[in-house]
Image: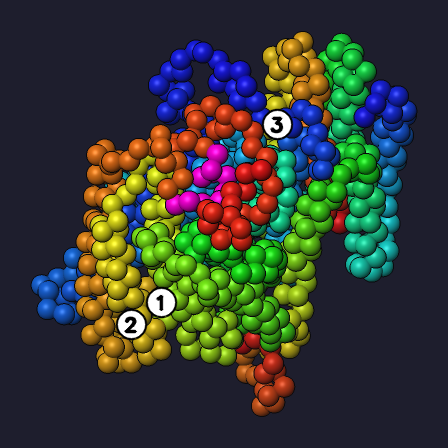
Amino acid sequence: MTHDNHQESFIRKYIFSTDHKWIGIQYGVTSMIFLLFGFALMIIMRYQLAYNANTGLEKDIISPDMYNALGAMHGTIMVFLGVVPMIVGAFGNYLVPLQIGAPDMAFPRLNMASYWAYFIGGVVMLSSFFIPDALPAHSGWTSYVPLATLSSGPGQTFWLVGMIFLITSSLLGSTNILVTIIQLRVPGLTWMRLPFFIWAQLVTSFLLLLAFPPLEAAGIFQLLDRVIGTHFFDPYMGGSVLLYQHLFWFLAHPEVYVLILPAMGIVAEIIANNIRKPLWGYKLMVYSSIWLGFMSFIVWAHHMFLTGMGTTMSSFFMITTMIISVPSVIILSALLMSLWGGSIRFNTPMLFALSFLPMFAIGGLTGLPLGLATSDIHLHDTYYVIGHFHHVVAPGTIFAIFAGLYFWFPKITGKAMNEPLGKIHFWGSLICMNGIFLPMYLQGLAGVSRRLANGGYDYAHAKDVLYLNEIMSISAFLLFAFQLFFIVNFFWTLFRGRYDNETDTNPWKSTTIEWTETSSPPLGHGNFEVIPNVYRGPYEYSVEGREEDYYPQTEE
Amino acid sequence: MDIEIPYNVKEREDTGLYNSKLGIWLFLASEIMLFGALFSSYIILRTGDPHWMLHAKQAHLNIPLGTINTAVLILSSVTFVMSWVSLKLKDLDKFKMYMGITLLCSVVFLVIKYFEYSAKFDAGHYPSTHNFYAVYFTMTGLHGLHIIGGIIVNAYLWLPGAKMWETDPERFTNRIEVAGLYWHFVDLVWIFLFPSIYLL
Amino acid sequence: MSDHNVQSHIKVYWNVFFTLIAFTALTVGISYYDFGSVFWTFFIGLSIACIKGYAVAGYFMHLNDERKPVYYILALSAVFLFVLLILPISWRTSAGSHSSEHEQYIGQDEYVIFNEPEHHDNHHEDGGH
C-alpha cells in the first residue's frame, strides 16, 4: 500500500477529516456533549417536579411553557442528537470498518458530510434556546399537530429545519454503513462469521434508510403549514391531523429499534468476550434481528390506539406488536443463556453489559400492556409510558454505550480506564436509574399524565403518588453526580493514563479483527498493515486443544 | 489523502456490484419511501376532502405544458443513457453532446415549470389556497428540487468532472452510470406524478 | 457490459424512448374519455404509468440485467411502499362509513353526529364519534 508523504493541514486532518476513526470520535464527542446537555435539561425539569409552588417554594423555578420547552428538547436531543449519533455515528463508524477488515468506510467523503450535517442540525436545534423573547420548540419531541403548527414563536420552525439536517445526515450515514458491510468484508468473512455487532448495525441502517423519509415528508408539510400557511394538517380546511401522526410514527417506531439494536450488538460483543465461550444461539440472534427489523415497520399505530381508529386497524397493530416482542425476547434469552457455563469476568464493561439484560427485560415487559389496546386505554400518555421507554433506553441503551466506551477505550486511545472508578460509576448509576424510573410505573398506573409541569398536583387521582416525585428527583440528581466518576475517569485516563500500547493491543484477549489486527489506536491511513483473511467465526473462545482460551478470526 | 477503497471501480465477485452502484440504489430505495409517503399523503388528503374535485377542476392545470414536460424529461432520460453508451464506446465528444442535450432538456423542464407556477400565482392560486394546490406545489416542487440537484451533478460531470476521463476512464463511466440511475429515477417519479395530479 | 452488448442496446434504448412518448400521448388522450367509473379511470391511468415506469426502470436503469442484491433491496422497499400505500385505503375503510344524514363534516378526522337516533349500539364497533 503506497502512502502519500505530504503533511495534512490541521483542518484536513481534524476538522474535515475523511478518516472513519476520527469521524467516529467527532460523532462520539459531540454526542456525549449533547447527552450531558439533554440530561441537564431533565435535571431542571425534575427539580421543578419535586420542588415547586405547590410543595412550599415561593414560586416555580420555570414557567409551564418553559417546562414544555425543556421536555420537548430533552426528548429530541437525547434521541436524535445524543443516543443515535453515539451508537450509529460513533460506534458504527469507528468499529464497522475495523471489524470487517476494511481500510475505511466505502465513501469516506460522504462520511464527513454526514457528520457535518449532524453538527449543523445540532447547532440549529441548540440555537433555538437563544431566540430573543421566544422559547425553543415546546410541543413535545413528537411535535403533534395542530399544537406544533400553531405554537408561538419560531422555536418549532427551528426544530423542523434542524430535523431536516439530521435526517439528511442519517440518510448519508446509513447508506455508507450498508455499502461498507456488504462490499468491504475481507476474504473469508462470510455473512455468518460476522460479529453480531455488525449484523445489528446492518439491520439498523436499513431501518434508518427506509423509515426516515416519511418523517421528512411530515416535517416538510408541517414546515409549509407554519411558514406559508398551507393546510395539510388543518382539519377545518380539508387537512388531516392524524396524517401527521401516521407519518411521524412510521419513522418513530423503527427509530426505537434503531435505539436498541446497536446496543444489543455492543452488549453481545462484550458478553461473548467476557464469558470466554461462544455466544449461544448466534444464528438465532441474527435471524431474530432481521425479523425484528422487518416487523418494526408494521407496528407503528400502537402509538395511536386512542385516536379513534377502527377495531380492524387496532387489532392488526396489536397483533403485530405482540408478535414483535418475540424476536427481542429471543435475542435477550440467547444472551442470557450464553452465560451458562461461562467463565465470567466481571470487569466494568461486563457489569454494564450484564445489567442491560434485566433492565431491557423490565423495559420490554412493561411495553406489553401498552401494546395491548385495551390496557393502553388506561396507560396511554401516563407516566407508565415514560417509565417503559426510559427503562429500555436509559439503563438499557445508555448502559450499553457506557459498556462500549469502557470496552473499546483501550483500542481507540491505547490507554485503559480505571476499574474502581468504573465500578463506582456502574453501581451508582444502576441504583439511581431504577430510583428514577421504577416509581414512574406506579404514578402511571394511578393515572398521572405525562408532560404536566407541576407533576400532577392538580389531580385527585395523583394525590397518593405525588410523594414519589421527590424520590425520583433526588435519584436524578444523584445519577448526575455519579456521572462525574465517568467524566473524571475519562479525562484522567486520556491525559495521564498508564498503558503500553506497544506490548498489548488486545488487552481483553478478544477474537475479533479490530482487536487482533490493529494497533491501539489503529493506523491512521488504512487501518491495517496487511489485509487480514478470516478463517473462522467471531466467538471461538475456549476451543479444545488450544493453549490460549481464544482463537482469533484471522489466525491461520 | 486518498485511501485505496476496494471495489470502487471493479465489481466485487459475490455481489456483482461496484460500491457506488449499490450506494445509489440504496439511496433510491429511500427516495421511493419519500415519494411514497408523499403519494400516500396525497391519497389520504384527497379522499378525505369532499371539496377536492371542485378545486381540482377550478385549477385548470395546464395539461399541454405538463405533457410537453413529460416528453422533455423522457427525452433527457434517453439522451442520458446515450451519453453513458458513448463513454462505453470511448467517444468523449458524443458523451459531451448527449449530456449537453440532457442538461438542455432539464433546463427547459424548469422553465416550463416556472411558467406554470407564475400562471397559478397570477390567478391567485397559492399553496395556502386549498390542499389541492398545496399538494400540487409541494409534490412538483420537491420533484423540481430533485431536478435542480440532478442538474448540478450532471453539469459538474459534463465539464470539470469530465477531466477524470483522462486519468480513470472506467471510474468516470461508472460515475455517469450512477448519476444516470438517479436521473432516470427523477423521470420515473414524474411519470407517476403527471397523471396523478394533472389527469386523474 | 461489453462493447458489442452496448452497441446492440442502442436500438433498444431508442425504441423504449418512442414507446414512452407513444404511451404518454395515449395517457393524455385517454384522460379525456369518460370510463363511467372512478375505479376504471384510476386503474387504467395508473396501469399505463406502471408500464412506462417499468420501461424506464427495466431498460434505462438496466434493472432487467441487474444483480441480486439490488433486487433484494428493491423488493424490501416495495414491501414497505405497499404498507405506506395500503394505509390510506385501510384508514378510509376502517374508520366507518359516514353516511348518516345526522353527521356533519368538520374535517378529515372528525365527524360529529347530531341528534343521533336511539339505535346507537350497531355503530359501536368503529371509532367514529
Q: Front-most of A409 and A183?
A: A409
Instruction: Please give the name of the residue rendered at 59% of the width and 60% of the height, measured from the top-left corner.
Output: A284
Q: Amino acid at mark 2?
A: Pro
B162 relative position to A358: left or right? right
Question: Which residue carries the number 3 mark?
Answer: B6
Q: Are marks 3 and 1 in contact (CB under 8 Å)?
A: no
Tag 2 and tag 3 share a subunit: no
- The subunit letter for the residue under badge 3 reads B
Q: Amino acid at mark 3?
A: Pro
Q: Are marks 2 and 1 in contact (CB under 8 Å)?
A: yes
Q: Amino acid at mark 1?
A: Gly
Residue A228: image location, x then y, percent: 48, 43
Whether residue A72 is visible, yes or no, is no
Q: Residue B190's image quarter?
A: top right
Q: Residue A507's image quarter?
A: top left
Distance from the alpha carbon under mark 2 to that under mark 3: 53 Å
Q: Front-most of A71 and A33?
A: A33
Q: Describe the element under mark 2 as helix, strand or loop.
A: helix
Question: Which residue carries the number 2 mark?
Answer: A439
Disc assigned to residue A387: 1
Mark nearer the viewer, 2 or 3: 3
**Range covered by the magenta-colored residues:** A508-517
Whether residue C19 is visible, yes or no, is yes
A15 relative position to A477: left or right? right
Question: Does A513 lie within the magenta span?
Answer: yes
Tag 2 and tag 1 share a subunit: yes
Q: Front-most of C16 and C96?
A: C16
